């Protein structure tokens, strides 16, 4: 208003108008053209200034898809074909000559039996076999020879058992008092020590070194492990440069006692070594969702999630974009994408903005 009053006082509008009317027609046209040019220029400047102050945004589109979950972890190579190596009960172990993780060949000595006690045991067992045989002969001599008494039958069974035990002990003596590996493999566990007596069960556990191997992965029983299923695809690699892709999951075992999940991944034959540590990548895809968006488009307010949808409108100044706040429910997510409901597939949304947005903000699309 002050400017208007200033112009009114300093400029004689009536005189100015009369001067314009007295101008030649071509000069009047020039004045009009200049006036319009000035107005157009001011409009452009106004438009550019208006656009410059608007938030600049990157727009994207919601679309159907799946959410991919990737877990990076470690696994240990173990064997599915472990078997026990043992001998008869009650033998005194002299020395264990292998260690856990050691590769052995068929016929290699795993542990030895104390010589003197075994020799003494063989002598005693031979005497027992001879004594039972003598008893059987006496009973047969006293019978009429037409039938075998129950007592004779029982003694024959006893002699057979003693002879089997005796032959087993003689076999150990012939092998140099050693218990040998029945096949090539790797020692995975040793359940006996020097000075102990054998229990007749697993003294040493032996696994196949190249076949029937599996990578065993231990995961914590949390949200991440819940994405692992039989449809999960695994990739493994070792420190020596070997790798295998597109491997299947054989089994998933949830151990509630310690809150862990064991995942078994069968490995290619003769590619990895028993006991080796592997880097493991587990990849799972979710069901197909109607609406997936980039993770950067998701905003949170309190415990609620929302996105900014975009509406476009043609105006006298051109196309204008407006941000519209829309609440959504999160169905699934990973580090890059989110599956939501609350907006439709194909909806234009704001993925990134250089300013904090509010509902109803006019925004400028970044090129």
Image (spheres, rainbow, N blue to C red):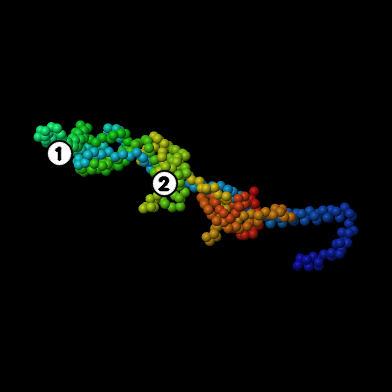
Q: Is residue 201 visible?
A: yes
- The part of the image, by quadrant, that contains residue 98 is top left
Q: CA gap, disc 1 to disc 2?
A: 56 Å
Q: Which residue is mark 2?
A: 252
In the displayed structure image, the side of residue 59 where residue 121 appears, left or right: left
Q: Which residue is mark 1?
A: 151
Q: Is residue 60 visible?
A: no
- The part of the image, by quadrant, that contains residue 272 is top left
336 or 86, nearer to the observer: 86
Question: Helix, strand, or loop for circle 1?
Answer: helix
Q: From the viewer's perspective, is the residue at label 1 or at label 2 nearer?
A: 1
- The part of the image, by quadrant, that contains residue 183 is top left
In the displayed structure image, the side of residue 354 where residue 16 appears, left or right: right
Residue 117 vertical position relative to residue 359 in the rendered view, above or below? above
Q: Kindly identify which numbered label has been placed on residue 306.
A: none
- Measuring 40% from the left and 49% from the top, which residue is drawn there? 254
- Measuring 49% from the left and 47% from the top, which residue is drawn there? 69
């Amino acid at each position: 208003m002050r400017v208007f009053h200033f112009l009114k006082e300093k400029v004689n509008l009536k005189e100015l108008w009369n001067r314009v009317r007295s101008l030649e027609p071509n000069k009047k046209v020039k004045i009009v053209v200049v006036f319009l040019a000035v107005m157009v220029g001011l409009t452009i400047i106004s438009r550019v200034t208006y656009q410059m102050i608007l938030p600049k945004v990157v727009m994207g589109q919601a679309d159907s898809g799946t959410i991919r979950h990737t877990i990076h972890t470690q696994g240990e190579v173990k064997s599915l074909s472990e078997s026990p190596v043992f001998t008869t009960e009650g033998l005194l172990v002299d020395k264990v000559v292998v260690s856990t993780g050691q590769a052995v060949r068929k016929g290699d000595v795993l542990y030895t039996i104390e010589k003197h006690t075994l020799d003494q045991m063989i002598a005693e067992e031979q005497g027992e076999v001879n004594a039972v045989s003598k008893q059987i002969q006496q009973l047969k001599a006293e019978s009429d020879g037409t039938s075998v008494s129950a007592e004779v039958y029982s003694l024959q069974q006893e002699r057979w058992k003693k002879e089997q035990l005796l032959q087993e002990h003689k076999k150990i003596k012939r092998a140099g008092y050693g218990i040998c590996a029945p096949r090539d493999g790797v020692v995975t566990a040793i359940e006996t020590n020097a000075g102990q007596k054998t229990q007749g069960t697993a003294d040493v556990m032996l696994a196949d070194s190249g076949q029937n191997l599996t990578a065993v992965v231990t995961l914590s029983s949390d949200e991440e492990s819940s994405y692992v299923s039989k449809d999960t695809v695994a990739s493994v690699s070792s420190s020596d440069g070997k790798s295998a892709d597109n491997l299947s999951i054989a089994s998933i075992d949830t151990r509630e006692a310690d809150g862990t999940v064991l995942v078994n991944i069968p490995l290619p034959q003769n590619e990895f070594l028993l006991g080796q540590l592997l880097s493991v990548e587990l990849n799972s895809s979710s069901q197909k969702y109607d609406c997936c968006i980039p993770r950067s488009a998701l905003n949170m307010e309190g415990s609620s999630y929302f996105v900014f949808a975009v509406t476009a409108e043609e105006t006298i100044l051109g196309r204008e974009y407006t941000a519209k706040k829309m609440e959504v429910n999160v169905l699934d997510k990973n580090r890059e994408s989110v599956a939501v409901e609350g907006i439709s597939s194909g909806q234009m949304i704001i993925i990134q903005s250089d300013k904090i947005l509010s509902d109803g903000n006019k925004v400028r699309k970044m090129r």
